[in-house]
Amino acid sequence: MSANGITGRMANQNKLKLGIFSANCSSGMAVTKIPERWDNSWENNIKLVQMCDEAGIEFMLPIARWIGYGGDTDFHGSVLETVTWAAGLLALSKEIQIFATVHTAFNHPIVSAKQLATIDQLGGGRMGLNVVAGWNKPEYDAFGVELPEGHDERYERAQEWFEYLQKLWSEEKAFDWNGKYFQGTGIYGNPRPVQSRVPILNAAASQQGRSFATNNADFLLTPVFDFDQASETVKELDRQAAAIKREIGVFTISAVVCRPTQKEAEEYLDYYANQNADWEAVDYLMKLQGMHAQSFSADALANFRDRFAAGHGAYPLVGTPDHIADELEKLSETGLRGTTLAFVDYVKEFPYFRDEVLPRLEKKGLRSST
């Protein structure tokens, strides 16, 4: 058990924790038109979770998405719903922790509390919760919900949602709730999660999002662009958490192209993320996420565009097993506690990463053998 009461693999002693990101989504994290891009079928997800479970990977994390990003591929147009996805994977795995991603704008706390408690029982106490305040206007439009103009209201609602959920999991007697966003009488939550402390994750890059995460989450997932920026980000988030007497593990997101030679890796990157990128979807995704703001230089914007094609803005891990192990070591040295991983084809490419990169990380003292 960790200092914050979390159990399971997320509480292990590995200096660099690893998770799989976005396997529930069509094309995963690669905004590409190549025919061999990720097929997010249920069969493929079963194969992947069982390989990762056996390899000692700490967790799997899904993206909750309701509307795709268009382009030739309608990137993320097909997405397995995250709570039912988590339930199935928990039933078909043994030790790996499976996160469910829940939009606070589209899900009522009473329903989510019961769903999540149920799947935690199903998995024997291995469920994690990724809380998402929501930002994607087309999704708000699809639900007929008004997207608040600023981050403050989104996170104010998310805070109330989260506190309501926690009360449902902790209060012994029926209670009334009379908040700004939710109201109800005679409420109680039963069953409860198996875990006394469900691990909470939150992805954030904005000031408001990071404040929400440091106040509520155990793990904060945030993009990094280079080692210096990563180090400064971790230091700042550690200071924010320490100021309120909390501790938070900062994770980032990575996109992996691992091949026997650097040339092979770079050629494959060029093949799927340049020659065959779905640029229409890339540009629409960047527009929605606000990456076209004038505060970014032309060079930075071009770099973001390449990274969005390669892996939804993830840090690129491209090269030989030695190179990737060295890059992961450098990321760890910035203070990051872990990273998510994405592959163009998870099932096809993960075994090589498992066989070649994981042993190198063990030799570096970043991970223990399973």
Image (cartoon, grey):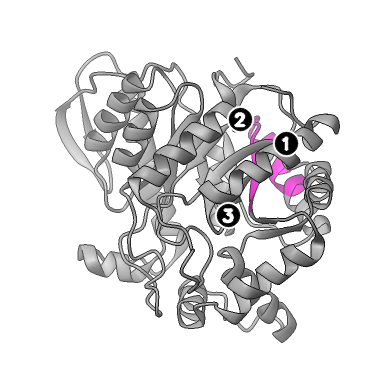
Tell which circle, 2 or 1, labels the residue nearer the N-terminal end: 2
Q: Secondary structure at mark 3?
A: loop
Which disc is residue 343 wearing?
3
Residue at the disc numbered 2: 55
Residue at the disc numbered 1: 358
Q: Residues within 10 Å of mark 3 (few under 14, many from 20)?
A: many
Specify the quadrant that holds the C terminus.
top right
Which amino acid type corresponds to the residue marked 1 in the rendered image?
Leu
Residue at (29, 65) in percent of width and height: 140
Q: Secondary structure at mark 2?
A: helix
Asked if the stretch drawn in magenta spans residue 157, the answer is no
Specify the quadrant that holds the N terminus.
top right
Q: Which span of residues is magenta-colored?
A: 234-254
The relative height of residue 49 versus residue 27 in the rendered view (above or below) is above
Q: Secondary structure at mark 1?
A: helix
Label 2–label 1 contact, CB within 8 A: yes
Give the image quarter of residue 58.
top right
